Image: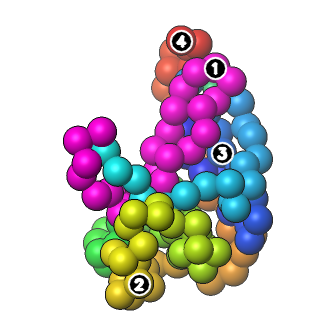
Amino acid sequence: MPIIQLTETLVTQQCVVCDAERDIQVDTLTLGMLTPGGVEDTVSILMPRCACGAYEQLVRSLEAAPLSMQGHPLEHRKAVNALGERLKSLGNTHEQLVHNFAAEPPASNLPSVLPFKVSKVKRPLGRNNKL
Ligand SMILES: [Zn+2]
């Protein structure tokens, strides 16, 4: 379920299961989560459940992207990192993990302008079966 567009206020997401596109308000999302075992996860952004039942968890990648990374993987990485930066600027971080974000340098590989569009990936036939 990739991000296909990011603005200051909206994330447009396409569900990998049902192909539905939906706009999600950025300010309803939270950066970071605690796993059921109590592990501090500062890179994940849990997206709301799709109407088909699918969940997506976006994962930031804070290290520099390899030079060989291009096209959709690089664009999507930029979009997810930019969403993470936006959530930090809004203060939408997990309340028990705030201390982790305070000292964190800004992510690299961010889009130069918003809205940022991510090219869609052509999937092989049969991947869009409903659950
Ligand atoms: Zn779906």
Identify the image quadrant of the N terminus: top right
Tell me, for residue 131, which label it has, or none: 4
Vertical arrangement, residue 54 with respect to residue 41, above or below = above
Mark 2 surroundings: few (<14), some (14-19) or many (≥20) residues within 10 A: few
Q: Which residue is mark 2?
A: 102
Q: Which residue is mark 1?
A: 52
Q: Residue at x 76, y 47 (%)?
A: 23
Image position, residue 114 (x, y; %): 72, 75
* Foreground of the two, 25 or 4: 25
- Region rendered in magenta: 36-59
Vertical arrangement, residue 11 with respect to residue 9, above or below = above
Distance from Cα at disc 4 to Cα at disc 1: 7 Å
Tell me, for residue 13, which label it has, or none: 3
Distance from Cα at disc 3 to Cα at disc 2: 28 Å
The amino acid on which the numbered mark 2 sits, given as a three-letter code, is Ala
Distance from Cα at disc 2 to Cα at disc 1: 36 Å
Disc nearest the viewer among 3 and 1: 1
N-term-proximal mark, 2 vs 1: 1
Q: Residue furthest front?
A: 96
Vertical arrangement, residue 11 with respect to residue 1, above or below = below
Disc nearest the viewer among 2 and 1: 2
